[in-house]
Amino acid sequence: MEPAFGEVNQLGGVFVNGRPLPNAIRLRIVELAQLGIRPCDISRQLRVSHGCVSKILARYNETGSILPGAIGGSKPRVTTPTVVKHIRTYKQRDPGIFAWEIRDRLLADGVCDKYNVPSVSSISRILRNKIGNLSQQSHYESYKQHQPPPQPALPYNHIYSYPSPIAAAGAKVPTPPGVPAIPSTMAMPRTWPSSHSVTDILGIRSITDQVSDTSPYPSPKVEEWSSLGRNSFPPAAQHAVNGLEKSSLEQEAKYSQVIWMAPHSNPICETCLLLATCFHGQNTVPCPPTHMASGHSTRMKLIKKVREAPNGLPAVSSFVSAPAMPPYATPAQVSPYMTYSAAPSSYMASHGWQHAGGTPLSPHGCDIPASLAFKGMQTAREGSHSVTASAL
DNA sequence: GGCGTAACGGTTGAG
DNA sequence: AACTCAACCGTTACG
């Protein structure tokens, strides 16, 4: 049972023990680091422990992914039916064969690679337990032959580094009536590794491509950005996201979406948005004059600015006032799931970055599309003019 | 003071 | 269906 509320760390930040930080926060950690902000300052600004900041940045630098690793599940066995079958064949052809010879042959024949080849002791066990009595084994094998072919050698946890989450989402979660399907540009599978920049990870173009300056409704991308805030959920949404169960998450996401619609008709402090430090209650109040005075801008201004950028790839740094540190809200009053459940189900539907058959919904509903969560998306996003997943 | 990381208590999900 | 257990998580504390 998931806790209804998270815990509060020494910095006052809210977290859920055992669960990853929302991708939006992970993203912002990387973003701020690329702006030259020191990890210790990122830690303080975002109220995430420096250990976590360090880990996320180290992972990002190493792999290019901001995403957490795959949680749960079991490591695939190396002694797949195919491997056992080959071992039996070797043994039948050469009853005196040694286990280490079998191991070498599995490698030489390409049945296994060095990462998944069974150990000599495993082969010995197989010979003893499975090959020893072929009459019993044949029944098992005839059954197994009707099963799907075993997966080729892949490192465990490989899948979370090669996400195609939107496509998976589209397959898992039906599009509600009246809600346009996710465009193929969003569903495009990504390959890994790829060369990406944080600017595109942030999905700035996604936002600007969508939002009309006069539109009273935000794109889902804007909601996503807005969900970066830790204290931005109105109290009315609490019952919808507390006590959450997987079976009702999609409904809750929709409910959260309703809550999130109206506020964005007003300009939002861009700095607050980016730094996720204050959201002025329900996002319906523009930034206080003090914020403007300290260099903050509004979302509307941000959007205009981005649109004026010649190549459509504005520097994030031009929009962030790093030294400005707006005050934080009282974190103890905030459910982390308030923060984590703001995305509409129509596009945030799956942790496809994890296991392919994983949980379609997670409490961390503000997850950015994982396909965007990699270094640089220039090529992947070419011609991606519309990423609309509509408001209800 | 900043940072890397082991220990810790926790969650997850395939088998 | 319940259980196992090895993967992961973020925080904390230590060096």
Image (spheres, coloured by chain):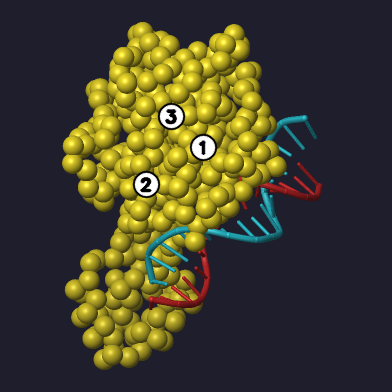
Chain colours: A yellow, B cyan, C red
Q: Nearer the viewer, residue A54 or A106?
A: A54
Q: CA distance from mark 1 to mark 2?
A: 23 Å
**Tags 1 and 2 both on a single chain:** yes
Q: Quadrant of residue A114?
A: bottom left
Percent across and percent down for residue A193 are 39, 38
Q: Amino acid at mark 1?
A: Arg
Q: Spatial distance from mark 2 to mark 3, Cα to Cα?
A: 18 Å
Which disc is residue A36 wearing? Answer: none
The quarter of the displayed image where residue A89 is located: bottom left
Instruction: Measuring from the top left, give residue A224's x and y in whole percent.
Output: 40, 32
Q: Which residue is mark 1?
A: A26
Q: Are the numbered discs 1 and 3 placed on the same chain, yes or no?
A: yes
Residue A319 at what x, y percent from top left?
50, 15
At which x and y percent is residue A288? 56, 15
* Label 2: chain letter: A
Q: Which circle's residue, 1 or 2, is located before the other in the chain? A: 1
Say what secondary structure mark 1 lies in: helix
Q: Is residue A118 above or below residue B11?
A: below
Mark 2 lies on residue: A252
| Mark carried by residue A225 | 3
